[in-house]
Amino acid sequence: MSLVIFFTLLKIAFSADADLPNDAPKLAAKLGFGWNLGNALESCSDSNSASETSWGNPATTQALIDAVKKAGFNTVRIPSAWSGYIENTTTYKIKDSWLKRVSEVVNYTIKNDMYAILNIHWDGGWLEENPTFDKQKEVNAKQKALWTQIATYFEGYDEHLLFAGTNEVRKDYGTPSDENIEVQNSYLQTFVDAVRATGGNNKIRNLVVQGYNTNIEHTVNYLRIPSDNATHRLLVEIHFYDPYDFAGEGNSQNYLWGKSYANSGHVSSWGQESWVDEAFGMLKKNFVDKQYPVILGEYGAVHRTHLSGDDLVQHTAARKYYLNYVTQAALTNGVVPYYWDNGGTGDNGFGLIDRNNYSQAFPDDIKAITSAKR
Ligand SMILES: *[C@@H]1O[C@H](CO)[C@@H](O)[C@H](O)[C@H]1NC(C)=O
Ligand SMILES: *[C@@H]1O[C@H](CO)[C@@H](O)[C@H](O)[C@H]1NC(C)=O
Ligand SMILES: *[C@@H]1O[C@H](CO)[C@@H](O)[C@H](O)[C@H]1NC(C)=O
Ligand SMILES: *[C@@H]1O[C@H](CO)[C@@H](O)[C@H](O)[C@H]1NC(C)=O
């Protein structure tokens, strides 16, 4: 072999293309059912005393992620806090110990041949709650500093690791103003630019950008995809808890969902099957069909174990139907679903897997998700 050929082969073997052969559409096709490691690494407090256990879950272990894999999931979203793990508020230097701990958890997934999505989550709100001109400069400086460090630390990881720039950035829960959209978009552009600038694998790593408040309609109406030098390496993220009085408000009277219960008096006035179909259909038309895969980064429904008798029986059936229906609508429209598991397996919890003994707290609900057809 000539030296020229040898060095050419060597270059290919060690290039980013070898580690990350799949662009976003191809990678999305490899992502199966997703699961959120919720209320864990994103736990934080107002003071600088963050800890991954401060929201009540035990520290994450390899055994937990093994149980997630065994349950049928092949990708894990890892919401993460950073602000409470900074050692210098001028440079925003992240503590080495925290980067190491996050990488340990990322490794639990990758060792299982699963895919991981790492983000900057709520994180006390500095990024999430400030899409306004008065905060734009300060937030972008911090966003750039954090993503530069995170991306640098994880640069050597192959395509099993994706980064997601933000979580649910919003001013409030209403319709965004032009200002809100412009500033939110700048937070995404800063993320993409900061990651790409660290070079190596990060030049083409698949990155996830979020619509305003991860709301489907706002995403369809307002998301401006950041400019990116890499081709087809961006995914779009939305979340879905509609109708919230069923999915998220455990104490509301609307504990049933779907056509079987339409006349029960316990079904929300909106957000039923036709809305699910319409919402996910919009994502397919506006993004998936245009080479921007979409992840449903969070969805789920609380389990109201305070109910009893027939109410509980019907609620349990409705919840299974909802989880299956939403998962199926996502898959049918090319959207990758990530169930929101916050570890809470008691009343009004989203947990599916017990974080202490790794058993399946609600095996039927897990099956409702993983029996949807790809
Ligand atoms: C933080 O970084 C700045 C800029 O490098 C430096 O001047 C300052 O001393 C650092 N502060 C601490 C607490 O280390
Ligand atoms: C994570 O895995 C990488 C690649 O195998 C390894 O280099 C690194 O030391 C691991 N990190 C930790 C904290 O175990
Ligand atoms: C993207 O490409 C343009 C033109 O080649 C270059 O000027 C710019 O610095 C690149 N941006 C990044 C983030 O690498
Ligand atoms: C796991 O813990 C839960 C809650 O304490 C308990 O109900 C369940 O039986 C345990 N499962 C196993 C397999 O130990």
Image: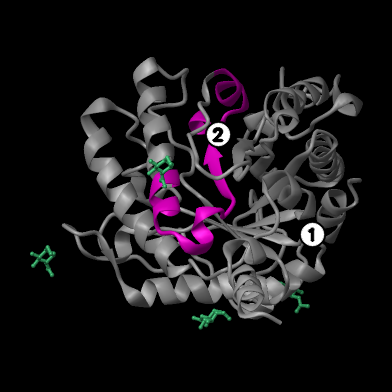
Question: Which element carries disc 2, helix, strand or loop?
Answer: helix
Q: Residue furthest front?
A: 2
Task: Classify the position of the N terminus by image quarter.
Answer: bottom right
Q: Which residues are magenta?
A: 192-221
Where is residue 332, by image quadrant? top right
* 270 in the magenta segment: no
Among numbered discs 2 and 1, the one appearing first in the sequence:
2
How many labels, in total?
2
What residue appears at the point 56 percent right and 55 percent down from the top-left corner? 205
Measured from the top left, where is residue 282 in percent x and y? 72, 22
* 207 in the magenta segment: yes
Q: Which residue is mark 1?
A: 362
Q: Amino acid at mark 1?
A: Phe
Q: Is residue 45 visible?
A: no
Q: Is 271 on the left or on the right of 188, as rendered? A: right
Looking at the image, which is closer to me, 14 or 365? Answer: 14
Q: Is 364 on the left or on the right of 183, as rendered? A: right
Question: Which element carries disc 1, helix, strand or loop?
Answer: loop
Ligand 1 visible in quadrant: bottom left
Q: CA distance from mark 2 to mark 1?
A: 27 Å
Q: Residues within 10 Å of mark 1 (few under 14, many from 20)?
A: some
Looking at the image, which is closer to me, 280 or 52? Answer: 280
What residue appears at the point 52 percent right and 77 percent down from the top-left corner? 104
Q: Are marks 2 and 1 in contact (CB under 8 Å)?
A: no
Q: Which residue is mark 2?
A: 214
Q: Is residue 322 visible?
A: yes
Measured from the top left, where is residue 277 in percent x and y? 80, 25
What residue appears at the point 27 percent right and 34 percent down from the top-left corner? 136
Q: Nearer the viewer, mark 2 or mark 1?
A: 2
Q: Is 265 on the left or on the right of 119, as rendered? A: right
What residue appears at the point 66 percent right and 80 percent down from the top-left corner? 2
